[in-house]
Amino acid sequence: MILHDGLRVARKRWRAVLVGLLGGLLCAVIITWLTPREYSAQVTIYVSAQAGADGAAAAYQGSLLSEQRMKSYTQLLTGTLVAQGVVDQLGMHVPTAEVADKIRASAQPDTVLLTATVTDRSPLHAKNIANATGEVFTRLVTELERPAADLPATVTARVVESATLPSTPVTPRTTVNLTLGALLGLVAGGALALLRDTLDTTIKSAAQLAQLTGAPNLGTITRDPDMPEHPLTVHEHPHAPRAEAFRKIRTNLQFIDVDRPNKTIVITSALPEEGKTTVLCNLAIVLSQAGRRVVLVETDLRRPRAVDYLGLEGAVGVTSVLSGQVSLDKAIQPWARSQFAVLASGPTPPNPSELLDSQQMVNLLTELRERYDTVLLDAPPLLPVTDAAVLGAAADGALLVVRYGKTTTHQVKAAMSALESASVRLLGTAFTMAPDAGTNRYQPYYSRYYSNEKLDGDHDSTSPLVSVPRQALRPDPTRNGNGHADGGLTGRLPTDTLPDTNSDGQA
């Protein structure tokens, strides 16, 4: 499970892992570039004992003696005595300690062979110092192992392999540095990805959202590059994944409580720009396609956006009806061949919360419930203002819209608390702007499965859902510069797409 979680974090935070990897490689390249090149030359020395009059026995004792002294000879090779001899022999004008630091000695196990290795920035100096080290050491061993001035040495040393001119530097080790840099970079990137994942409290999955709210996620709407330009599904193939997602929400809403149908539903979110208006308008479309009588009421009296999405006028609406200026029949507008009815927000009032909490609003909702099968209320976000909670108290429940990678767990909990404080029933959630990897991969199956079929209650699968030209619904950057789901739309529905209507706004 730990490996699975690690892979999940790596996939989700692959940019952090990549940054760590590139950073590690860059550091390795810089270190390799700044490290001076050094060359190594080595000389091999053979240490042996001299055979005396006792023959084989003396030779054996001498061999044991030479093996026992190998450790001492190794220290002697790297000492200042040998280094001073090398300096004198080569006529070098450098400190003895500096030459001693360049010499490394090792004894091959179970042998009487010594190896002296010299490292220097100059390959020629490395070779000369190594050969001089071998010559000085052999003379020193002879002097030290001579029992008397007129007697031969019991142990002798001689060079069996002289140093050659090195052609390849031993440092920097480019391959090792790059490999180590890549590994350390991956570790650092993984740690950064894990840290960001731990500190990131935004909602990343429908399962996480359902567990947090305790309510079912009714549908997941994937991110679509064309959504800012064409937020409504009327411009998509009827069986496109996004259209299917809204139909799934429609179906799930019908099965939440079959004994108590939810006729009045508040569509809200924790904060702005989470796709609330997009969900509202598309839900009205798919509900009307199923043969239900739907009215969309723009009760976001502070920043109304729904009529802009739908290409309708918002000068007359809810506030006009509540203030008694216009009757409900005259305020309701049909949308696109009377697919569903729309009640715009009307003029912006100075006291939206008090107006929505009035008895007149209760009476308006009661009348709409009697006329229509489903009443969809576009409410402001829950955290900035209390309008949505006020509306929810007079409705059958609320649908909470949550945006992938933006809405945090704290914000969802605060929104839940706002609903609970007003005793508003949370019907479910809608997860918007989710990555398309989990949904679009099924698009080929949709195309094959529905190639020759129609959905019950829907329009022909080979034609648009409604006769609305693309240019009629176009995002207006002046209304909402970020281009997100709650932006406005320019243009109005052409008059030839709207049928003749009677006084109550119905076809």
Image (cartoon, rainbow, N blue to C red):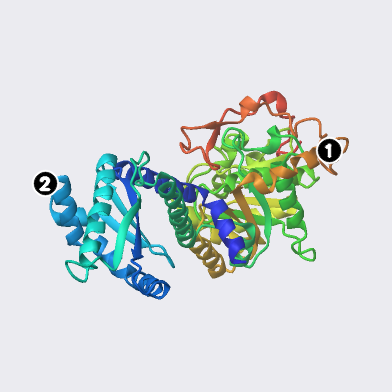
Chain-order first, disc 1 or disc 2: 2
* Front residue of this view, candidates 382 and 38: 38
Q: Kindly tell me whether residue 103 is visible in this rendering.
A: yes
Q: Disc number at residue 93?
A: 2
Within 10 Å of disc 1 (Cα), the crowding (few <14, some 14-19, many 20+) is: few
Check disc 2 and report its element: helix, strand or loop: loop
Amino acid at the residue labelled 1:
Arg
From the viewer's perspective, tell me whether residue 285 is left or right of residue 230: right
From the viewer's perspective, tell me whether residue 155 is left or right of residue 244: left
Q: Quadrant of the C terminus?
A: top right
In the picture of the structure, the residue carrying the numbered disc 1 is: 448
From the viewer's perspective, tell me whether residue 97 is left or right of residue 280: left
Q: Residue 234: image x %, image y %?
A: 70, 35
From this view, report whether residue 277 is shown above or below residue 312. below
* Front residue of this view, candidates 134 and 300: 134
Check disc 1 and report its element: helix, strand or loop: helix
